[in-house]
């Protein structure tokens, strides 16, 4: 299926060309439910919101360079206006990123198929997708607008930017594909995964935590795409299919559970007046339906088994394992390091999800506002339920979803084979239900009936004294307290100033190399002529020795 339609709007005599092919249909299906959910969350009467949605649709279905640029920039301009409405400070940074993105994309779309065009595409679309090192705007801009807009920015705009990289890298520029193209995406992706997961673990404000998690998942999709692009350039059909399946399934899952989490965070803030986890708690009792939907989405964010986020990460990790065997010792070392970083990031993401639900929704309320919170009665809960319902088949029958996406994989890599998913959630669910029924029977038959007050610690669940209606704060963990061990581990002796500790932790080795280079340059400046000549001679000998060893090898 590949239908091209011309709309007589835009360039004189040419109009705009739009396309319906498997890739564009997949991303339209991905965008539709979150657009509806965002509208139900309070944006239905906002013209700017619908211009934002229109720009994303045009960018996805674009069949010409003009249509893609028009849709992409309409998306950027509308989202900037929505961010500006929320907070002017991040809007200034965001417009700078949007200008940089356009400056890279516009010439890239008119260049012939080449490595230069691919690099410009990755820079332009990667900046909009929040890939490192051009990600710093995202944790500031995404939390600024209302929750419905934040949901669509995180779940939709990021995917639109990645769809540009997919279409250009796998289709338009396929004649010039090189294996190192995939390496560029893998490097940007793994840096995004680590920085995003680490920052999410350190944050205490709900929407900022979710925005940092978006950086992580954008990086995870980029890693899958990089593995597939590298494999396609090397002629490995099976690995290409495995990487594409993992990346596309991850994009679909993230497009469902992350908007749900953002809308839920907005409803929590509306009900309590704050989104700081340190001032929440006990919402599972006062807002049970919203909390249940948030718990379902958090299972996807944490990539837990039987959750919507497990199968995509399962496929991407297996693709990285398979890629380690496609090269020499350098490839094995590199992909082993990649697996280690992905594993560490998965643990941090799990910690962030536990902090989100455990501190924000369990325990006792930490403030009067949290204690007085009520279940939302508007349409926002219906939008969240729509996204939650669509997550169920993705979590329980991911293999069937992959079969539906097979035409997309064949379009991007015609020679790619089918990679069966070696993960069966339904038997695991059946086993869990059997265990739960057996445990319930044992508790009902042999358990102690009635309730009793438990003195002591009880992690904040014990009966509070009369003079402390919310309990002793020392008996309940806080978001700041949970993040403190990680912050202490990475925040010492890196860089001066108030910069983000997660980014500093990643950039610290480069900073130390920079300092050594500055010291070396200062020594050379103060050296005598004899010392400078000795340095040049030593460097030349070292260069010739290295050249000889490489030539001999």
Image (tube, rainbow, N blue to C red):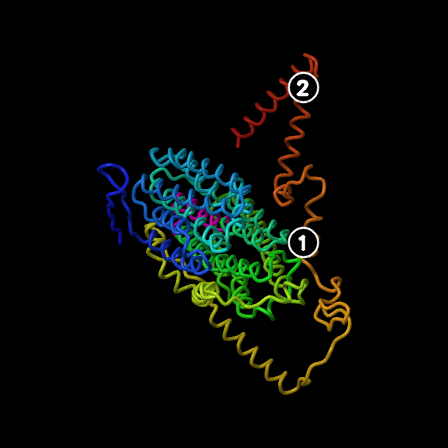
Boundaries of the magenta span: 219-237
Q: Are marks 1 and 2 in contact (CB under 8 Å)?
A: no
- Tell me the residue that label 1 is attached to: 483
Q: Residue furthest top?
A: 529
| Residue 152, percent from left and from top | 45, 53
Residue at screen point 45% across, 66% down: 382
In three-dimensional space, the C-alpha distance between marks 1 and 2, rounded to whole angstroms, equals 44 Å
Q: Considering the image in quadrants, where does the N terminus appear?
A: bottom left
Using the image, determine if residue 71 lies above or below residue 407. Answer: above
| Residue 134, percent from left and from top | 52, 40
Residue at screen point 51% across, 71% down: 428
| Residue 553, percent from left and from top | 53, 32
- Determine whether the residue tagged by mark 1 lies in a helix, strand or loop: helix
The mark that comes first in sequence, 1 or 2, is 1
Question: Residue 519 — which label?
Answer: none
The question of residue 223 being in magenta is answered with yes
Q: Residue furthest left?
A: 13
Apparent side of residue 58 relative to residue 301 in the rendered image (left or right) = left
Q: Residue furthest front?
A: 45
| Residue 542, percent from left and from top | 61, 24
Residue at screen point 48% across, 51% down: 154
Apparent side of residue 353 relative to residue 31 in the rendered image (left or right) = right
The question of residue 361 being in magenta is answered with no
- Tell me the residue that label 2 is attached to: 524
- Determine whether the residue tagged by mark 2 lies in a helix, strand or loop: helix
In front: 547, or 181? Answer: 181
- Assess disc 2: are there few (<14), some (14-19) or many (≥20) residues with their C-alpha within 10 Å of its C-alpha: some
Using the image, determine if residue 19 lies above or below residue 439. Answer: above
Residue 159 visible from this viewpoint? yes
Residue 330 visible from this viewpoint? no
In front: 380, or 450? Answer: 380
């Amino acid at each position: 299926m590949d239908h091209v339609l011309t709309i007589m709007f835009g360039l004189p005599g040419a109009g705009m060309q739009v396309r319906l092919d498997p890739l564009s249909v997949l991303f339209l299906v991905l965008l539709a439910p979150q657009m509806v959910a965002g509208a139900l969350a309070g944006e239905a009467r906002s013209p700017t919101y619908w211009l934002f949605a229109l720009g994303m649709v045009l960018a996805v279905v674009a069949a010409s360079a003009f249509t893609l640029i028009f849709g992409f920039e309409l998306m950027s301009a509308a989202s900037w206006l929505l961010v500006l409405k929320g907070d002017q400070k991040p809007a200034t940074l965001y417009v700078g990123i949007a200008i940089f993105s356009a400056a890279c994309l516009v010439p890239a779309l008119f260049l012939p198929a080449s490595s230069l065009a691919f690099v410009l595409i990755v820079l332009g679309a990667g900046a909009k997708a929040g890939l490192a090192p051009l990600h710093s705007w995202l944790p500031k801009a995404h939390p600024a607008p209302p929750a419905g807009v934040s949901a669509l920015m995180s779940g939709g705009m990021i995917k639109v930017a990645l769809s540009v990289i997919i279409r250009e890298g796998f289709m338009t520029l396929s004649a010039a594909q090189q294996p190192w193209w995939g390496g560029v995406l893998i490097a940007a992706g793994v840096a995004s995964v680590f920085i995003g997961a680490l920052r999410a673990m350190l944050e205490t404000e709900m929407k900022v935590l979710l925005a940092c998690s978006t950086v992580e998942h954008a990086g995870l999709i980029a890693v899958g795409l990089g593995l597939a692009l590298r494999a396609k350039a090397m002629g490995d059909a099976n690995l290409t299919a495995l990487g594409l399946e993992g990346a596309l399934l991850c994009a679909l899952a993230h497009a469902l559970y992350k908007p749900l989490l953002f809308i839920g965070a907005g409803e929590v803030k509306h009900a309590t007046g704050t989104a700081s986890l340190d001032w929440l708690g006990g919402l599972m009792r006062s807002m049970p339906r919203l909390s249940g939907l948030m718990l379902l989405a958090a299972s996807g964010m944490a990539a837990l088994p039987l959750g919507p986020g497990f199968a995509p990460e399962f496929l991407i990790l297996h693709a990285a394992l398979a890629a380690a065997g496609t090269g020499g010792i350098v490839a094995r070392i590199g992909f082993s390091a990649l697996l280690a970083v992905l594993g560490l990031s998965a643990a941090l993401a799990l910690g962030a999800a536990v902090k989100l639900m455990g501190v924000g929704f369990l325990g006792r309320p930490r403030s009067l506002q949290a204690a007085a919170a009520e279940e939302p009665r508007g349409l926002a809960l219906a939008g969240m339920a729509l996204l939650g319902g669509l997550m169920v088949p993705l979590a329980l029958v991911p293999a069937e979803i992959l079969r539906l996406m097979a035409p997309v994989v064949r379009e991007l890599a015609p020679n790619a084979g089918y990679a069966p998913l070696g993960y069966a959630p339904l038997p695991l669910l059946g086993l869990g239900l059997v265990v739960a029924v057996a445990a319930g029977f044992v508790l009902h038959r042999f358990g102690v009936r009635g309730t009793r007050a438990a003195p002591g610690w009880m992690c904040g669940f014990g009966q509070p004294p009369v003079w402390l209606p919310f309990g002793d704060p020392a008996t309940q963990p806080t978001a700041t307290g949970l993040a403190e061990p990680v912050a202490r581990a990475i925040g010492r002796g890196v860089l001066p100033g108030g910069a983000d500790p997660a980014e500093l932790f990643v950039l610290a080795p480069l900073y130390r190399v920079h300092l050594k280079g500055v010291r070396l340059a200062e020594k050379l400046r103060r050296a005598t002529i004899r010392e400078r000549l000795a340095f040049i001679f030593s460097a030349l000998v070292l260069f010739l020795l290295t050249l000889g060893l490489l030539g001999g090898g």
